[in-house]
Amino acid sequence: MPDNRLQELRAQVDEINLQLLELLNRRGRVVSEIGKVTQEMGRSFYDPQREAQMLQMLEAANNGPFSNETIKALFREIFRASMALEESQARAKMLVQRKTDDDRTVITLPDGTEIGNGVFTVISGPCAVESYEQLDEVAAALAERGVKVLRGMAYKPRTSPYEFQGLGEPGLKIARQVANKYGMFITSEIMDKSDIPMFMDYVDIFWVGARNMQNGALLKSLGQLNRPVILKRGLAATLEEFLYAAEYIVSSGNPNVMLIERGIRTFEKWTRNTLDIGGVAVLKLETHLPVIVDISHSAGRRDIALPLARVAKASGADGLMVEVHPNPPVAMSDAKQQLTIPEFHALMDEIERVEIRV
Amino acid sequence: MPDNRLQELRAQVDEINLQLLELLNRRGRVVSEIGKVTQEMGRSFYDPQREAQMLQMLEAANNGPFSNETIKALFREIFRASMALEESQARAKMLVQRKTDDDRTVITLPDGTEIGNGVFTVISGPCAVESYEQLDEVAAALAERGVKVLRGMAYKPRTSPYEFQGLGEPGLKIARQVANKYGMFITSEIMDKSDIPMFMDYVDIFWVGARNMQNGALLKSLGQLNRPVILKRGLAATLEEFLYAAEYIVSSGNPNVMLIERGIRTFEKWTRNTLDIGGVAVLKLETHLPVIVDISHSAGRRDIALPLARVAKASGADGLMVEVHPNPPVAMSDAKQQLTIPEFHALMDEIERVEIRV
Amino acid sequence: MPDNRLQELRAQVDEINLQLLELLNRRGRVVSEIGKVTQEMGRSFYDPQREAQMLQMLEAANNGPFSNETIKALFREIFRASMALEESQARAKMLVQRKTDDDRTVITLPDGTEIGNGVFTVISGPCAVESYEQLDEVAAALAERGVKVLRGMAYKPRTSPYEFQGLGEPGLKIARQVANKYGMFITSEIMDKSDIPMFMDYVDIFWVGARNMQNGALLKSLGQLNRPVILKRGLAATLEEFLYAAEYIVSSGNPNVMLIERGIRTFEKWTRNTLDIGGVAVLKLETHLPVIVDISHSAGRRDIALPLARVAKASGADGLMVEVHPNPPVAMSDAKQQLTIPEFHALMDEIERVEIRV
Amino acid sequence: MPDNRLQELRAQVDEINLQLLELLNRRGRVVSEIGKVTQEMGRSFYDPQREAQMLQMLEAANNGPFSNETIKALFREIFRASMALEESQARAKMLVQRKTDDDRTVITLPDGTEIGNGVFTVISGPCAVESYEQLDEVAAALAERGVKVLRGMAYKPRTSPYEFQGLGEPGLKIARQVANKYGMFITSEIMDKSDIPMFMDYVDIFWVGARNMQNGALLKSLGQLNRPVILKRGLAATLEEFLYAAEYIVSSGNPNVMLIERGIRTFEKWTRNTLDIGGVAVLKLETHLPVIVDISHSAGRRDIALPLARVAKASGADGLMVEVHPNPPVAMSDAKQQLTIPEFHALMDEIERVEIRV
């Protein structure tokens, strides 16, 4: 007879399960409502005091057979699920959040070139503009391989105030001239919103560096422009913070934002940073914005540029960024990671070798 | 008005919680019954097919707002809780968890010296036993200042197989002799459970290093002894993992465990590790086990030993661990961080200077 | 014998070092001369082609054991040193670096109160100004315990653009009024250099947050003021980067900078950040600037405030920063970490309990 | 005339450069010799006291025009280069170090299947053996796609002593039976060297988990066997430590070691760990051992398995490891990251889509 008894007991469990399901979802709806109310009140929906109080109440009411510890553990999971629900609903309201599988932001450059349309884009140029000759030499090589977006960095954020800080406006002038010569577009780092009007004369794509990823004033100002913005992940920014930084720009009115993953700061010393390629995959799930992989700053060494280029292409990212210099050993900055021009050609060949068949 | 609305919604949640509690316990009782029946039938209680079937049923019935994934995750927790209930409800509560404010483990050494009783303990000695003379010179200085627990390290876990690995059993013999001479007790790192019988001849307190914090076989074996164990936090272990590692020992039968915070691995390079002093404060809240601060490995430099000693004492920790060597520059390991004997005396003076008035 | 051999080899190195020194300085003199000549010729001193040519020559002549890469890296440093010599030899020495044991920056507030003079300072106030009543209630309690520097935060950098961003200028007005009422001084976070003129009307001490630690434009602008600046460590900034950020301010003309350690980002989840107390000790060695310990953001939880306050005082820091709110659970931000007013009084009592005897 | 003068001065610089080069290399040779002597003495070649003394001597002897600061900075670079020379020479002596471009360890399984020969290998199976039926179902699917190495995990290292610890020897028996049925080979985690004799009856490839990466006793014992070993990177191990851990095995006599990169612990929360794909590229440069990418533990989520599989293949790694379970939601461990069998087939299809053309 135990088999019958077993069937009977299992039927009871099935019924309890369905009641639990109904109650959990009811709870989810009420907590959602609470989330809305607390948000209106400008408060965080995570409230540890409230959780402690609920747990105390449950402990007082618990008659077993589950121990208080187990009950508290189970309810902590329920709280966590409710929080996750809240958070995912909050994120779902984000403008940068991908809503459907086909949802993608495509950025169109003045000549019609598109970024984010499924074709793998290469963004390149020297770490910094050092002279007309230097940039011209690099740009000629890049143009030969079809690169459209040229780094024209003239304001360099540096750790020390005594390091080379970039050529400033004369550097932007050089960048503009060279870009025009080769039919290319200039991206250049802006470090303060007061420079925007001047930048408008020279720059096609604004670049926000890792140190300024959470410079809210700058992000909001760039959100009021109609030019694309490249936003770099902060050196220890979470992916969530990264998306919210992009949201600062997009929610201010400018939808043309690209994200660059450039490695995060970890304990590992053999690379300058740790390229978060899993983060790239997650970003492609979470947002419709184009995602670019910076293979220069993440590695900090040129000897792994080829495998990282293959990785970037295979990851599903929309492109990669790589620094190229006519003579890296004498570069004013980032000497160890910039590619020579022949190395750049080898990189372009390598990218072409990688094929993801349909 | 939002405050009223919030109160109302929270009351609804409270009521749902109590209904959930009641249902969960009801489920627990039925599942207990099933456990008995299946046991009678000679069948295993764990039945993945049955669980899969229940999850399918819930998925079919789920109308949200929780996603199927979340519902399945919650029920998986409920299944697991039921299993745990069935298997060993008693163990669900961690033994190392502090239950009341006065709850503290006091470890008593053979001569009656106590660790964890509110008096600040200093554990010291060289990084490794190098010779009788070396250990004797250090121990004489330590004994003079009342130190009772002497490092007698003879097995050194090293990054490279080609580095000095310790003197082995002859080192333990030296340690025992020196400890006996000065009425001290030996703590020494054990790296494999097969060494336990031999260690029993020489060692008063077993020491588990950072690299072995999650060596379950070793922890369980030490849990079957009646000698105290010092457990070091792994170099990137969370506090939760640290407490669970201690639980491996305590749940195997040995309650005499001390915890050592020794810094965690971060990106910062000016110290060898980052001393997690906030973690020490949290451990003192969470567990009744004594907590010791290792000021040598956390800093990796001797020039901040005095402030770190003051910090350790002020933190509420039960003691500190510091490495002392007669001649650090020629030490076989950790040359940069070991104190000289005069520096050790200065450290003891400094500790005495710190007073926490009642 | 190896010890003798070692002495002998070291003597050889010493001699080579002195020859290198002599050659390097000789090179410096010749390059100085070249600088003068090229200036006369109206040419830029920086000549990448010339450097490339020198590197090629060295590469050709190099027989090892140093690789060509290493030799080029070393000479790149030598070129850079020569450049630095030419440009501004004076600046090569960091202004924030402590030169002697007694070397300390003391910041004097308008009423003569000093920070950095050896007395332990408490900086406090709510996370953000929410209303006159809220700030007044906190300030009254702080003033009672002698706190002189009041947080008057009206611009809050937030992860999400949809979170509470602070009251803005009206918040600063409130802060000014309240500070005047109690004879206190306002510190307030500035996020963009364009806000400086407005801030000058309300704020006694400028505050640079963690997200702006490397906002060079802001730092340089603050360096041109004659008001003190509190600079917070970035959430994953190294101590070296932290000091260089301070150098941006000081080298622009403002010596009155205080540093705040506020915890760094790590994998540990039981605290919001990991308080780097070893870093505080290192900063006190390396710089003459006052160093303050933020016990609120580092912990992210109020239940370890007392031990962290003791730790801050014992560490040798010049003070601590703690957030206080009349009713933390309803705070607009940082609800989990702000102290209640009674908790603040307990904290002040606790600080007084810690004595470092001389 | 300035042009002549310039030529003259430049010739002087060229000559000084060559003298510097000669001296630097001479210094390199002497320091190499010192490295050998100190190694014989069992001491570290990094000696900060010695460096401090040399800098003092140089400071005393310096007459400018370079400032003491600049001279010290230059010599610190010279010291660093010498250290790097020492370290690279030390590493060059490592058995696991790649000596030439073609240098690769190929591991041959009993049926002649090779790992590390340029063909991309897939290692797979459930997180843990739960029953014969479970493993059989997975193995059937894997065998269909040509997978040869089957996870047969029966000893699970778990954070808590109360979590499922694996089926033990009965699990190994099941694994052996299933592997035999499909002509596959079993890899299984070993946690203590005392289990080796028993494992020899069931297991084809020993597996060392992340928690045991630096369990020296275990590594040395495995080094005395003639079966291959899979070594996982510790959760916060540097690449250098990883290679040295492999060196423990290889230097004990067993050359058949594979490395698995499984993500490192960082602050990022959207993935369980951060896959260090740059580290994979560096490992392929530094060592001849096969390198496998674990796409399950690094991500901790199955929804990015496809992009990570493409990335693994493109990176130049020798294969990937992925967990597969007939019904992940009811898995005893790692429920969130195991693939279903249909997902596994999709993964194999995806891997085939990636082509690196020659």
Image (tube, coloured by chain):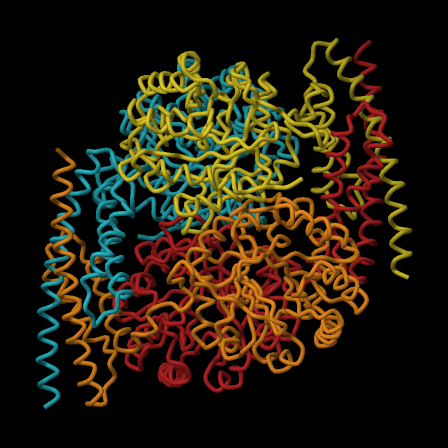
Chain colours: A cyan, B orange, C yellow, D red
For residue B228, side relative to residue B39 (left or right): right
Instruction: Give whichever of D52, A197 is nearer the camera.
Output: D52
Q: Position of residue B250 (x, y in %)?
A: 46, 72
Q: Position of residue D174 (x, y in %)?
A: 36, 84
Q: Position of residue B21 (x, y in %)?
A: 17, 63
Establish if A176 lies above or below C63: above
For residue C253, side relative to residue B236 (left or right): right
Instruction: Give whichever of C181, D109 is nearer the camera.
Output: C181
Establish if B219 lies above or below B19: below
Q: Quadrant of the N terminus of chain B?
A: top left
Task: Give the number of callouts.
Answer: 0
Residue at 72 percent of width and 42 percent of height: C68
Residue at 90 percent of width and 56 percent of height: C5
Establish if C247 lies above or below B180: above
Residue at 35 percent of width and 32 percent of height: C158
Q: Position of residue C186 (x, y in %)?
A: 43, 21
